[in-house]
Amino acid sequence: MLYENLAINNEGHLTIGGLDAVSLAAEYGTPLYVLDEDVIRRNCRTYVTAMHECFGPDAAPLYASKALCFKGIYPVVESEGMCVDVVSPGEIYTASAAGFPAEKMFFHGTNKTDADIRFALEKGVGYFVVDNHNELESLERIAGEMGIRQKVLLRLTLGLDPHTLEAINTGRVDSQFGVPVDTGQADVFVRAALDCSNISVEGFHSHVGSQIFESDSFMKQVEIFAEYSAKIQSKMGFTARVINIGGGFGVRYTEKDPQIDIPARIREVSEHLKAACAKFGIGVPCVFMEPGRSIVADAGVTLYETGGVKEVKGYRNYVTVDGGMTDNPRYALYKSEYTVLNASRAGCDADYEVTVAGRCCESGDRIAEYVKIARPERGDIIAVLTTGAYNYAMASNYNRVPRPAMIMISGGKARLVVKRETYEDLMKNEL
Ligand SMILES: *Cc1c(COP(=O)(O)O)cnc(C)c1O
C-alpha cells in the first residue's frame, strides 16, 4: 500500500484509518471524500517540530488553505500550532467562521480589490503578503482611513525555476506573482513600502512552485533572500525580520514518486540559510513556510461507485465512476497521476488495465489512464488515493453534478464534516 493508514481487511476490502471503505461508501454515499484527521495532524507536527528545531520558537508553518478549505480543517491545524495562509476573502470568512484567530492569518493574492483589503483589515488579519505596487497604494490609503498600521510581507520573484510542472511553477521572473528582483523593480517596491506610514514592512515572501521533491530550489531561495536582505539593509537601512519561503513540498501520488524526508530537507534549508546570512553579514531572520499539499493530500481518499466497464476492442478498457472532473479536475487540468484501487476487491490481483472516466459529457473527464486495478463490476467501490489537496477545493458543479460529501476519520471513528450538495443547493441563487 502507498500509505501506512491503508490496509486490507478479512473481506478483502480496503480500509482507511482502520475503517472499511466499502462500508463508508454504503453509509455516506458516493462519491465521498474521506479525510484521515490523524494523518493531517501527523503532517502538521512534522512541520511544526522541524521548524521549531531548525529555525527557533518564532518560526511557524502556515497551512496554505487553498489546498483544502472548509470550516472543519481550521480547528485541526490551529490545535497543532499552525498559522494559515488565506488567498481570498472567502477563505478569510471561512477561517473566521471556524474561530481561527485573524492575527495568525497571512493574506495572499495577486488581485486584492479595495473591498477585499477593507474586509481583511476589518477582520484584523495578521499579515498582508503584498503582491504589487497597486495593492501597496490601496492598502496604504485604506489602512490610513481605518486608522490601522498593517504588518506586511512583500512578495518577490527571485527568478527560480524548480523542476516541476509549468502550470504550477510560480517563481520565475516572467510570472504574474510578486515583483521581480532581477529587473531591479523589487528595490523600487521595497522603497515605496518603507515610505508608507500605515504599513509596517516585516520582511519578504516568495513561493517557488509546487510538488517539489528536492530542497535545492529552497536553498537557492534562502541564499538569494540573504543576499537581497543584506543589500536592502545597506541601501535602505531596513532589516527584514521575517522571510517566508512559501510552500511546495511534493507528495507521493504513485509508487514512482519519491518519499520526502521533510525534517531533513528543512534542516538542509536552515543550515544553508544560516551560512548565507553569515556570508552576507546579516542576522538570521524568522522563517515561515506555507505547506498546503503536503499537509492534506495524503490524508484524502475519494470513493466512487463503478457504473460500468467498457472494453473497446483493440483499444482500451474504460471504467466509469459516479464522479470525475467535477470533484477532481487535476487530471483534466495537468494530467496529474493518481493511484487507483478497487476497494471492493483490494485483496485480488491488480491485473486489469483501465482508464477511469468520470460522468461528465466531456472527453477530458478522466481521473487516471492505463492504471491497473482488480477487474471491477458495476457497484464496486473505486478508491483514488492522495485526493486531500486541490480536489474538494477545486470542485465544480459542471453538468449540474452536486459536490460530494466529506467525512473526517480519527481514532477509528468517522464523522460527516461537509454535507453532500442537494439539487436545491444547485439552484439556491437562481431567481
Ligand atoms: C499554492 C501556494 C502554497 C501551497 O503550495 P503547496 O504546493 O500546496 O504546498 C503556498 N504559498 C503560496 C503563495 C501558494 O500560492
Image (cartoon, rainbow, N blue to C red):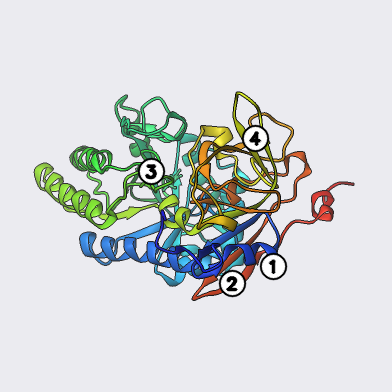
Q: Residue 300 carries which label?
A: none
* Residue at which label 3 appears: 154
Q: Earlier in the sequence, mark 1 or mark 2?
A: 1
Residues at marks 4 and 1 touching, judged by CB atoms closer than 8 Å: no
Q: Earlier in the sequence, mark 1 or mark 3?
A: 1
* Three-letter amino acid code at the position of disc 4: Asp
Q: Quadrant of residue 182?
A: top left
Direction from residue 333 to residue 403 in the image, left or right: right
Residue farthest right in this picture:
431
Query: What is the C-alpha distance between the residues marked 4 and 3?
Result: 39 Å
* Residue at which label 4 appears: 365
Q: Nearer the viewer, mark 1 or mark 3?
A: 1
Q: Is residue 285 visible?
A: no
Q: Where is residue 184 in the image (x, y as percent from the top left)?
A: 30, 27
Q: Which mark is residue 27?
A: 1
Direction from residue 132 to residue 73 in the image, left or right: right
Q: Where is residue 229 in the image (x, y as percent from the top left)?
A: 23, 42
